[in-house]
Image (tube, helix red, strand yellow):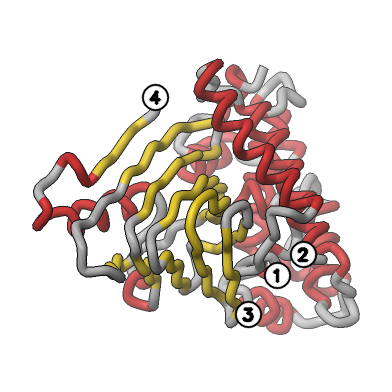
């Protein structure tokens, strides 16, 4: 069911605190810093499409800062894909800066420090994507953050139109539980982002982790796929393997675990399997009880519930 938040609901003196709470609750924990000395006017409309969360946000002139203190006690596991529809914005992350004008898009990672700025206010459509869902489709997501995807480019126009039409479609048809539609939408977005940023063209000679990730994704269904065997397969030590993943803020075992959960989610949501056990076994899980508990912790829904909605 769509949810709407507006600063018009509270007194002027309370609006900054209210808006900060709304942003933290909806997106990620940040420090909201107003850029203009004027009454704060913000509006946010949120709706769900499968496991994706879509929002139409009218932001006041604001810097949204996520630093070490915000990351310390809040571990949000998702990405934000921003389509700016009005105003000018800037997203800074991983030493890069994406400057956005109307129609432009950019992706950023909730698990990394960031600063999102709208110096004169803005309006944007935001897609909140759970980390495992994007990681299952793109091996090198860290190379796609804070890069401007121009709205007048072929890929930018395609993604922008898809996001706009998805908002309109949901308003007309009210499809909050259509996991298949969300999955198909994310397939298109992932392929377009990967193509436009060149993330799929990385050479394993420059980054051996790309080849390692591809090997792990190809063999998710092998329950014997272990960190020791992965390291041996690529002629490196377990310590080196963990260092490569640590550079991305994760570990080899956690990355593999997230990939397996994401793959099982995809097969269930798209109706590719008839039973939960089939999805679990196909993705390398031997313990069905452990799988179900881990799945619900990650996605907030039991796998058998997703199996029903995916059909």
- Kindly identify which residue carries mark 3: 247
Name the N-terminal-most of marks 2 and 3. Answer: 2
Please tell me whether mark 3 or mark 4 is closer to you in this view: 4
Name the N-terminal-most of marks 1 and 3. Answer: 1
Q: Gap between marks 1 and 2, in whole Å?
A: 8 Å
Please tell me whether mark 2 or mark 3 is closer to you in this view: 2
- Kindly identify which residue carries mark 4: 1
Q: Gap between marks 3 and 4, in whole Å?
A: 39 Å
The answer to which of 154 and 273 lies nearer the viewer is: 154
Does residue 122 appear left or right of residue 108 in this picture?
left
Residue 290 is situated, as x and y percent measured from the top left of the image, at 54, 41
Q: Gap between marks 1 and 3, in whole Å?
A: 13 Å
Residue 284 in view: no
Identify the element where label 4 is drawn. Answer: loop
Report the number of numbered marks. 4
Residue 295 found in image quarter = top right
Name the N-terminal-most of marks 3 and 4. Answer: 4
Residue 179 is situated, as x and y percent measured from the top left of the image, at 61, 28
- Kindly identify which residue carries mark 1: 143
- Residue at the spot x=54%, y=46% of the render? 127
Residue 289 is situated, as x and y percent measured from the top left of the image, at 54, 35
- Residue at the spot x=81%, y=51% of the render? 154
| Residue 197 circle label | 2
Name the N-terminal-most of marks 2 and 4. Answer: 4
Q: Gap between marks 2 and 3, in whole Å?
A: 20 Å
Local packing at callout 3 (Cα closer than 10 Å; few below 14, some 14-19, many 20+) is few
């Amino acid at each position: 069911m769509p949810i709407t938040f507006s600063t018009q609901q509270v007194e002027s003196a309370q609006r900054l605190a209210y808006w900060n709470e709304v942003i933290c609750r909806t997106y990620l924990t940040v420090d909201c810093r107003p850029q203009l000395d004027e009454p704060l006017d913000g509006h946010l409309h949120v709706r769900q499409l499968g496991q994706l969360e879509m929002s139409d946000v009218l932001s006041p002139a604001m810097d949204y800062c996520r630093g070490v203190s915000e990351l310390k006690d809040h571990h949000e596991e998702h990405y934000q894909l921003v389509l700016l529809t009005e105003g000018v914005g800037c997203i800074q992350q991983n030493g890069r800066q994406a400057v956005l004008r109307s129609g432009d898009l950019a992706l950023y990672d909730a698990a990394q420090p960031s600063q999102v700025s709208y110096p004169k206010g803005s309006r944007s459509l935001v897609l909140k994507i759970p980390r495992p869902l994007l990681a299952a489709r793109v091996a090198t997501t860290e190379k796609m953050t804070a890069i401007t995807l121009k709205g007048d480019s072929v890929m930018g126009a395609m993604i922008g139109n898809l996001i706009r039409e998805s908002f309109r479609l949901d308003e007309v048809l009210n499809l909050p539980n259509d996991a298949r539609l969300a999955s198909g939408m994310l397939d298109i977005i992932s392929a377009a982002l990967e193509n436009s940023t060149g993330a799929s063209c990385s050479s394993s000679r420059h980054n051996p982790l790309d080849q390692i990730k591809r090997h792990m994704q190809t063999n998710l269904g092998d329950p014997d796929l272990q960190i020791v065997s992965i390291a041996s397969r690529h002629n490196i030590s377990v310590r080196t393997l963990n260092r490569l993943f640590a550079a991305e803020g994760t570990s080899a075992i956690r990355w593999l675990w997230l990939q397996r959960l994401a793959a099982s989610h995809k097969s269930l949501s798209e109706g590719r399997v008839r039973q939960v056990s089939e999805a679990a076994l196909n993705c390398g899980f031997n313990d069905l009880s452990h799988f179900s508990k881990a799945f619900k912790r990650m996605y907030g829904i039991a796998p058998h519930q997703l199996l029903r909605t995916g059909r």
